[in-house]
Each structure stands twice: as C-alpha cells, then as structure tokens.
Image (spheres, coloured by chain):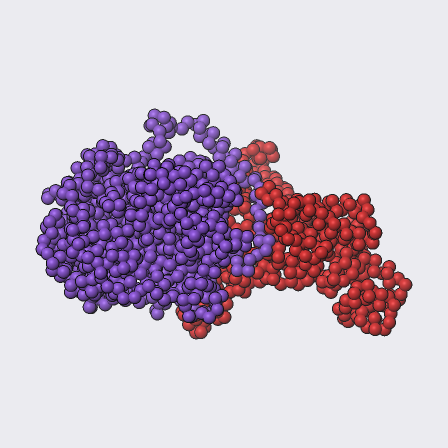
Chain colours: A purple, B red
Amino acid sequence: MKQDKQGIWIGEKDLTQDPEFIKAASQEFAGENLLETMGSKPEAVNLESTRRDFLKYLGFGLGAATLAASCEIPVKRAIPYVIKPDEIVPGIANYYATSYVKGGDFCSVLVKTREGRPIKVEGNSLSTITKGGTSARAQAMVLDLYDLNRLRKPTINGEDVSWSELDSAVKAKLNASSSIRILTNTILSPSAKMALEEFKTKFPSAKVVTYDPVSSSALLDANEQSFGQRVIPNYKFEEADVVVSFNADFLGTWISPVEYASGYAKKRKIQDTNNPTMSRHIQVEGHMSLSGSNADNRILVKPSEQGVAILALYNAVTGSGGKVAGLNPKAQAALTKVAAELKRAQGKSIVISASNNVAEQTLVNAINQSLGNIGNTVSFENASLQRQGDDKAFAELLREMKSGSVDTLIVNQANPAYDAASKGQFADALAKVSNTIALSYDHNETSSLCNYVAPVNHILESWGDVEAKRGIINSVQPTISPIFDTRQAEASILVWSESPNYNAASEQPYMEYVQANWKKTAFAAQSKYLGFNSFRDNLLADGVTTVADTQAGEVSFIGNASAAVNGITKPSGSEMEIVLFETVNIGNGQFASNPWLMEMPNPITRCSWGNYLAVPVNFDGVRKMVGLNGLKDGDLATLTVNGKEYTVPVIQQFGQMPGTVGLALGYGRTVAGKCGTGVGVDINDAVGLSEDYATYYATDVSVSDKIGKEDHFSCVQYHHTMGVTAEDKDTGETINADEAALVAFNYGIVKQGYQGALTDRSIIYNSHVDDLKENLSELHHKREHAQHLNSEQIYAGHDDLYARGHHWGMHVDLNACIGCGACTVACMAENNVPVVGKKEVTRHHEMTWLRIDRYFYGDLENPNAVYQPMMCQHCDNAPCENVCPVNATNHSSEGLNQMAYNRCVGTRYCANNCPYKVRRFNWLDYTTADIFPANQPSLNGEEVPFGADNLTRMVLNPDVTVRSRGVIEKCSFCVQRIQEGKLTAKKESRRLVDSDVKTACQTSCPTGAITFGDFNNKDGALNKKLESPLNYIVLEEVNVRSSVNYTMKVHNRDESLDA
Amino acid sequence: MRNILKIKFLLAFILLTMQFNGFSQGSAEEGKTLFKNYCASCHAKNMRSDATGPALADVEVRWADYEREDLYSWIRNSQALIASGHPRANEVYNENNKAIMTAFPNLTDDNIESILAYINVAANPVAATGGAGPSAGVVVEEKSSNTIYYILAAALGFLALILTRIISNLRVIATKSDDPDAIVERKSIVETLTSKGVITFVLFALVVIGGYKTVNTAVNLGRQQGYAPEQPIKFSHETHAGINQIDCQYCHDGARRSKHSVIPAANTCMNCHSAIKVGSTYGTAELSKIYASIGFNPSSGTYINNYSEMPEDSIKEIFTDWIADNYVSENDLTEINREGEKVVKEQWENIKSSLTNDVKDKIYGPIPWVRIHNLPDHVYFNHAQHVSIGKVDCQQCHGTVEEMEVLEQYSPLSMGWCINCHRQTEVKFMDNEYYQAYEQYHDELKSGDRDRVTVEDIGGLECQKCHY
C-alpha cells in the first residue's frame, strides 16, 4: 500500500516536503544569518561604516602589510636524533602489528607510525577474525592516545604522587584488607588473566568480577547450560543463507561486528547477475538498528515482546505448541513463515538474539539446535571470548559493597559508576568501600570517585596478548613509549602482588612477563616454529598466530527448552516502551571522549553530538507522515521512564515500531573530558534489572508533546542533499525538486522516477534479487539514455591524456556497504579533517570528506535502507573546475580533480556547482593558524579549538596539508597514498599494482565494499568490478563523467512477511 | 695634449692593476687547491693541530737543516726517504707511530713550493685574511654593475633633456623661419617639468615601478636564497664533502629512500669522530659539541653511562679537562697557562650555548641545527623521487656544497624554479620498469614521433604532484 519499489527518501522532512527543509536544502551553505552568527542583537551590530572607518582600516591594512613585509623570517630548527634508531627513517612510515582492544571489543590492526608517532590504524589482513577490516572505534583509537583527558600521574585522593608512593600505599591497604574485589570489563588477554591469578594467590580474599558495559551475560549463561561452555559461539555468517536476529545488532555493536560484517557481506554481494543468489536477513526489533537497516525484512515487535517472539519462532520451528499469547499478530504470522524458511535452510542459517534473558537465549540455542546449525554455522570451535561479563556476579558484588563487607575495590579499566546496570546505585555502594583503587586510562566518573588512581597506558603503549577467539592469539606491542607517567594495568597488578615472575627492575618488565607466558602456553601448543625466538618474532610481525583450540570438542545441546518456555519475559502490554541501545560510535559511553566518534553521525539517525529520542512516524493516510505526538525533528520533549523525567531532543525515525521509542546509551556523561562531558542525555538509569540481568528496555514510559526546540539540532541527514530547486507545478512555489518528486511520486501524481524525478535523476537504484534481470535491463536502458550526452565534453582531448598513464577510479559495492562508518573516521584520520563541534554541525559546517548517505526505500513505515558512501567523484567533466576564478581546482592527467588549497580564495563557487555536494569550506580557524580568536570554533567551551593543542596535533598525518581558514577542501582520492604507491613501484622498478595504492576508506572497510584502482590497469581489481552489470554512475545524466561507480542495491525482501 | 695625458694615466692604471694581479699570492693560492686535493684528508687545515698526520706549521723550519730537495722527496715519497736512512725522515716517522704517508709522485717541485707557501699562509692567520678577498670582490662587482646602470640611466636622461631642448630649439627656428614675426613662447625647463604630461608620466612610471617592486618583494617574501645562518657547530661541508670526499648520502642517508634527506644524528658523526677527536680547523672547539651532545668522553674514548642524568658540573669537568689537555699538548706546554684557561673557558661556554636554548636546558640531547631549506607546509617534496628515481645530482639544487665552508641555500626553492626544472628535465623513461605503464609514450618513442619524455609530460606540472 504505502510502498513503492523504487521511491527513495532520506527522512521525514524529505517525504513531507517540509518548507523549512526545502528552504534550507536550496541553499548550498545553510546557516543562520550574519546577525545570528555574530551572536548579537541586530541593533548591537553597527554594520554601516563611515569614511573615517574606511581610512582607519586602510591605514591599519597598510601598516600591517608593511610590518609583515619587513618582518624577518623566523629561525627554524632542524632537530636530528642523538642516536637514530635503526628502524626509523624520518619521512617513512613504520607499521606495527598490534591489536585494538577495549573491554571485549577487538580488532587486529596495523598501526602506522611516523617518526615514532602512531597516526593511523589499518586492518590486519592476516587476522583470521577481522580479516583486514576495521571499525570506526578501532580507527579512532589513535586519537584516544592523544586525549587531553588522559590521566598523567598517579594520584592519592587527588594529590599527585610518585609510583613508589602509590605502590607502597596500595600494598599497605591490600595487606590490611580482608575482602578484596577486582571489578573489570571483559579481559581478552591470557597474560592479564595470569597476572590476576597471581594477585589472587597473593591475596586469597580477592575475587575478580567481570561485567560488560552492555551485557551479554544471559547469552553466556544460557550457552553454559545448553552446551557446557560459557562462551560466545563462533558464528559463521559467511555460511548462513538465512539470518534471523532478535534485536542483535551484529553488524554494528553486538559482540564482534567487524568479523560478522565481513562474513555477512560475502553472502550479500551479487557474484553472478544471471543467476543471482543472496542470503536473507530478517531482523526482529522495535528500533531500527544498523543491522535492522540492512535487513531484508524487519519484523516489528516491542522490546518486551522479544521473549514471546523467540518463543513463537521456537514453536514454529519445532512444531511444538501453537500461537503465543501477547505477540502482535503480524509478527506472529511473519515468524511462522520465517520458521518455514529456516527449515528449508537446514544447517545453513543463524538465529541470534541480544536478549539478556537466559530462558530466551536457551530457546534460541534450541532453535539453532533443531535447525542443525550447531556445529555448522554456530560452531564452538574457536569460540569467541569477546564477552565474559557476569551480571549475577556483579549484582552480588553490589550487594556486598552495600553491606560494607568489601573493604578494597580495584576497578580495572572500567567505568561502572557510569555504565554498569545498577540503577545509579554503584556510586552509593562505592562510598561504603574504604579503599577504592582505579586503574584508569582517563578521568571518568569512576576514577574521580576512587582514592587511589593508577593511570594506565594506552594499548598502543602496551605489551600484551589477546585471545578474542579460542586458539587465535593476537599480539599487542607498543608503538610509542608512554607519553605520560603511566603504567600498564597488568604491571600494576603484578607489582602489587609482588610477583616473583615480574622483574620490575628490568627495562621492559611486562614484555618479559608476557613473552615468558607465551613460551609456556602458545609456543608450547604449536608446532610450526621450533625456536621460541622465531615464534615470537613472527607473532609480533604478523600480529596473529593460531594454536589448537583444545576446548572445542563435540558439542551437543543439553539445555532444557521446555523449562525455558516458562522463563521468558512476559509482554508488558504497556502502551509505550523504550528501547535502549548502544550506538556504533559511542558504545555505552566508552568512546564519548573521542571527538572523531562524537562527530561521526549515527548511521541510522545521522545525528552527531548527542542522543536523540527516536519516535515512530505514522502515515496519516492522506499525505503526511506524522511523528509521535506531532513531534518533529529537533523538538524537545519530556521523556518519562519509570517516573524519572528526561528532557530529550527528538528525531523522527522510520521503521520505529509504533508504541515504542528508542534512545541511545552512552551519552550525558559527567566526567568525560571536554568532548564528552554533558553531551546528550544519560539514560543508563532506565536500564532495567531482571533477576540481576540487565534489560535494555523499559515499559513504564511516556513522551510529552513538544516543549521546545533544541538549540543546535546536529543532524546531518538533510545536509548536502543532492537536489535542485524547481517550480512546483501545482502551487507555483519554488521547492526542492527532489522532495517534490518524491512526495508526488509516492502518492501517484507524477509518473516515474527516482529522487529528483523532475530531471529523472539516478542516485540509488534498487531491485529485488528475483526481479534483477528485469530491473537491470531497465537500468541499462536508463544508462544508455543518460549516456547520450557523453560525446559532449568540456575537456575534449582529455581522454587521450588519461589513457597515457594512470586514470584513477573507484567502485563502491552498495550491497556490501553496511553503513558502519569506519571509512568516515578513517578518512578523518588520514586526511587531517577537522572536528567542528555540535554548533558548527548544526550550521551544515561539518568537514567530512566522505559522508555516508542513508536512503530509505520500500514501505513507508517499515522501510529498507541503503547506504551510499559519497565522496568527491573526480568527474572528468567536473563542473566545479570551470567556475573557479583562480583555477584552484583543476584536473590532472590521471583523472584526479585536484584542489590546491593555497590557490583557493574561498569564493565557494565550486561547492555551489558540485552536483554531489562533497566540497567543504573551512569556515573557521580550526588550527589556530590566524591570530583572531573569534575565528576559532569551540566544541565544548575549551580554550583552544579541538585539535589545535600540541598533544592532539601529534595525530596529524604529516603528508597531508592542514588546511587554513577560508579554503575549500574535499576528497583527494588519498593522493598522498597514490604518490607514495607510485614511488614504491618506481623504487622497485616495476609496474604499479593494485596493492600499492589503497585509499584510507578502502582499507578500513570491514566488508570490502570499496575498490580503488587504475582504469588503465586492465588486469586490476577495479576493472574486474567494473564488469558487473549492476554498476551505475550517480547522476550520470548530468554528464559530469564521474570516476566512481556504484552498484545497484539488491535486496531479498520477502514480501509475504509484510502482509 | 690632454688626450695623451689621459692615455698615459690609463696605461699606468692598467699596468698597476696587472702588477697587483700578478703579485697576488699566486703560489699560495695554487697551494690551497693542492693542499685540499692531496693533504687535507690527513693534515689539519689550521696547520696547528695534529690530525691523522702531524701539524704542518713551520715544516720548513723543521727541515731547515737539510737540503730543500730532501723535503721535496719526503713529501713525494716518504717511505723511500725513510728507507734511505735519512735522519729527519726517520725521526718524523717514529714520532708519528710509524704511520705511513701516502706517496704523491706526480707533485712537481713547484707544486710543493706552492703547498709550502700555503702552509705558511694558513698557519699564520694574519696572512690568511686574504681569503676574505674574493667574496668582497663579488660584492664590489655587483655594486659596480648597478652603478653602471645608474650612470647609464642618468646619461640617457641627460640625453633626453638635450634632445628635447634641441627639438624645441628646432621648432622655434622652424616657426621663425616661416614667420619671423611670430612670437614663440618657449617653455622654461621648470614649466616643462611641471607640465601635465610630464607629471602624468612620472606618476605612471612611479606606479608601475612601485607596483613591480611591491609584487616582486611580495613574491619573494619567505624566500631565502643565499641564506647561510650561523650553525651551532661550525660544520664545514668543504672539509667533509670537498676535501675528504665523503659521499653526501653517507650522512644524508634519507635522500635515497625518504622524503627527507635527513640531518644526520650525532651517532653518524661518531662513526668517524670517535677516532678523529681534534678538528682540522677548530681543534677541540667544535667537535667537543658532538661529544657533549651524545655523551662521549673524548679523553677516555668511551661513552658516558647515564649521561642524560649527569649534572652539568660533571659534564663541564669532562670537557674542560679534554680541552685543556689538548691545549697543553698542542702548545707543547707542561701545564695550562692563563691564555689556555681563557681558551678552555671560552670553548666550554660556546659548547654550552650552542647546545642549549630556551626550549632545551640540558647539554645532553640533539644538536639544534638551524634549518636552511624551508619549504612551506603546503609543499610536498620527496628527496627519494629526485635522487633515486630522477638521478638528480645533489649539487643541481644545493649548489657546490663541497666548496661551502658555511652552507647556504643555493636555489631560490620557488615554485617557478621547480616548474622550470620539471619542464626541462627528461624522465629516465627506459631505465625504470614503472614507466612501462605509459604505453603511448613508449610507442611514440619507438616510432620516432617523440624524442624524449619530460617530467611535464607525465604530469609533473600538475598541482597535486606537490600540493596535497
């Protein structure tokens, strides 16, 4: 009904033709007017200037110019090494294999260092887990290293002390303690666990309690009951034809998203268009998650219905029992059909759930068992250890602390005062513990409550090891010596335990400890290397080694499914429920102090700098999409959860189950540095506890009407839309052509088209996998039509130029792109892209060179999404080039659209003329290069703009110019990497090959969606990709001859599930 | 009569200058070159301190008891003279731990005389001030060429004035001849100069010249061709690259593989200077700075443990002892004298001030060289591309560094300068397999349609070859 196969839209304003949006979209550089910008009342700003003023400015100008001209050039120093390390050549990057670990988050990475500074993270393609992919979080870790919020010295009660003072004080307290607890997030390091064992031997009263910021405790407990192993199974998405996920955001945040995304994408790419096959992904959820947005079908259920939904599927799969009470009939019917499909894919499907209810997880296990998945797609060989939290143990600890029976608590690199599911009781309980010791990386809610604070190294300053999956050992090695007076947490534990195996006097004591441990365990368990030194060297060089998984064995289901049926959550029947979820970028607050991640838009809502209450939008049956309570994007509303009121900004969310709202966890932190403090709303108190298990939803919820407007609505959804204005045929008003077309299209007024139907423009093409042939011929017909202008060229004869050497191009597979945003953060890191802050984002001034456009298509209330990474298309008929009055942007013989910053005078004509809206203007002085503080932005009231202090500046890529105020910048196809790759080939006197040049976005991608290469390299990967008939060029009909090809988005939606 | 006098004067002047030219340190000048080529790799340039070979000052005095011929043959082939049992030869041989001096059979007696003359000049600093002569001469030359222009301009101006006068006279004559009664108003010079036309012209000229000057000055802002700052260590490229012919890339080892040519670390200096501890020109004054930077005790020839933690007084003790000992042995004293104490104090203070600055208060640590070649931040330049792939000689951009006592910036390092070279330089197209990708050019080269491929042809003038 309210659905069309081909219409696409970006959001509610877009669909409903919101006049404000249309006005804004028609302006290239939207924002407040001058007076508002100056932050003053109109009368306070006298904009008239007199002759006297003119003379004054003239005099000042002349004087300044004379002064500048007569100034002597400052003496610059060239500081060499005293003793140059052999492996460092200034100007040449060194790469070290290490791991990104934050709690249970893991990614095997290569770290690029320049002159000893880590500046960029690349995926480690030797890793059998992440296979060279990365996540936005892993990409952003280099910035954490240079965080101003880092702890720099050990402290006792806030006073700086030396390590020896801290150690003797802590040791005295530990020796006097009768009940010691160590509270930690998941620990993946076998050596760290060994250190904790030594601690427990020294202090027999010590117990280690593990929790995760977002708990998977029930999944672990259920697996223990069902299979005898308290681990996460090894999910093989690359072998799954049907994936059913109950609220588990396995592509974004759940357990091991990089690994899962890489496997998942293998089944989503179309290999053979004549015989297309792809998996089917069904997501059962109430709030649209990243995984949900990529799913073929979403079955909408309220969060409290998850249990009965699982039961319904269980019943349908096993044939036991009938309908389930409390589940909405639509979901009930759909799940029955899903069961039939699952049964057809025996042994080749995966059913997962993020539920934190043991009974529900047991049912999921039973479903997988009955489908024959256990041992196939859900294997216990190389099972994952990436979540180890135990909610019951944590609850027990909380009770102990409250009763005062714990006298010493060591918090190991965790922030329970903010992120533990404790209904805000952790801080009170902590007050009853007499000795509180924090092993903490930065100032956070917990460290600020603890008496003894031992600052820990960043993982890039640390030694260690990681066993994220059993039998797969990854190394952790330092890439820089500790910047501040910090010490590894493990080292502190060992020092306090007075371990005989830890020689504190040696130069690298913990390295020796770890390597001695490797010798005993991993080295002993393998047979590839005869000597330990070669084993160690190879492990450090590769970053990964594999040993036998001794605990694998045969696994059989021994759980009690029939008992579990009674243990599931009962639907609340409440009118309004709230889904609480972690986001790709902020997690449950662990990443809130990282400006790159803060500025990265949430893939779904595309909001940055804050969490927005996702409210459902409903089709009013006539012409409008109406948000809950008439709320619109950027409105403020009062959210009441369990009686507690929160004032939250609102975003209208397509695909949000009616009767539910959603709000991200991880925001509103109170101690998170300049970047994270006070950004967004802290909703952690709303996390429920059911039999000590955290439940990430609440049922006692109400949402008020609009109570105001958010000052800075920092959602980039409507920025940089590829639209043009046109006249509305009915009203004669000037409106955004895209929206007019869309709206009209969806209601059957105008015939056919895509976004921008008036010009029949091609931005997104999509097709059902079964209709692919038909849609492809239509696509080709359209492309032929679009190409009829191709003989017309601005630069006739340039083709000949491109044919001579290289001609760079890109291919983006939209079927592989899941919208995770790793590429956007990678691009910021590689290209020194500034972070602009909430206010500037609101004014459309975000500087990202690579944005991921999210379009919806299909059902209006429950749509599918398609993600389109959009960067400079390096058009060979580039419309930006010929409008530049100073020729600052022009074309290279290699097909690159070049941008010479020092030539740019900032007319911004190019940005106006760019049909893809990918050019960015430096409105402000992000680097403090000029002398006027008024030109500098402020993220959160800091003294120097973010990134302009000397610590943060260490992250800059020295091969890329830091742009000054007043110039345009944009994606350069990572020209610094192109040049470096060419030089490498020249040095080795050989032809350039694909692996010489890979762009930052390409290497960061966990699914391999981006391919960069040389059109002239006939055997190259790019040309292979270009053979696919799915390819098209965005806005091909405007004949700008873009160098970036996209593929048609193919989905596998089961229409019958919608009925 | 007057003319003859003039010619006489001119002749006298020319003769005088010729004489001066003929007289000017001919043999010492030649000796300097010979010394550089043959002797300087072993003998100190200041002639006063020992290097690999002994100090050469007063060598003639020491050989005065013998035939001049003996000294010649000693220098030409010392081993032969020693074998012949010459007493002085054996004495010198034994004094220098029987180090064998290289034979120079092709040196003529005149050559040797020149070298000896130079040794005398160089050993006596007063005589050596002549060395400053050539550079002063250059300045004079520049000045004189400018003066010529000024004189020329003045002459032309004068000529123009006379011509205007003549034209105006002629016009008056012409008018009068047509009509003798006509009253011709002649403008006075002042009137001519203040006429509208002249003022307009002058203003126009001023604006043009001023604009030209302004633009040129503005364009040259930040450029520093010829920049030759004083360095914390008086490091001489002449001594190292010229006389001792050390390859540039021995120290600048980044040039072949990195964007930076790399200022060598102190440990690179130590490869040679752990043995050569007294400099040929400055003795202990400059070399001690390297030792003070890295923590090497030149007296004992060992690296100092925990040097970074060492208090300044202890460092001072090590180096003042070393300088004093050298002073004593160099001047054949038994104990340091007042003069020597002054030298020690001066040298130590110089070491300290050279190695410390407002951001570095410790003597230990890197040597704060003054950077000479400063490219703006928005320029990407890669040495490896030019040195390893383009096979460009270092001298092409950096000048004859091997002749620079004090290094200076030879090239303007302006964009025009870069671009010009890229236009003219031929790519080593056939030598590198990488360029096989440029098939069309290869075809054209084969067919003879093209005789060469310049850097410009493969995109060397495009913005993003250097700016990104």
Q: Is residue A70 visible?
A: yes
Counting every numbered tag in the picture gives: 0
Q: Nearer the viewer, residue B265 or A448?
A: A448
Q: Nearer the viewer, residue B204 or A309?
A: A309
Q: Position of residue B3 (x, y in %)?
A: 78, 49
Q: Position of residue A638 (x, y in %)?
A: 23, 34
A699 to B398, vertically: above or below: above
Q: Position of residue A236 (x, y in %)?
A: 27, 62
A881 to B425, vertically: above or below: above
Name the quadrant containing residue A813. Answer: bottom left
Q: Position of residue A807 (x, y in %)?
A: 37, 62
Horizontal side of B219 relative to A752 (left or right) equals right
Residue in the picture at 32% in, 53% down: A387
Residue in the picture at 47% in, 50% down: A497
B54 to A19, vertically: above or below: below
Name the quadrant containing residue A350. Answer: bottom left
The single residue placed furthest to the right in the displayed view is B65
Q: Nearer the viewer, residue B268 or A570?
A: A570
Residue in the picture at 79% in, 54% down: B330
Horizontal side of A754 relative to B437 (left or right) equals left
Name the quadrant containing residue B62. Answer: bottom right
Q: Is residue A292 visible?
A: no
Residue in the picture at 26% in, 51% down: A218
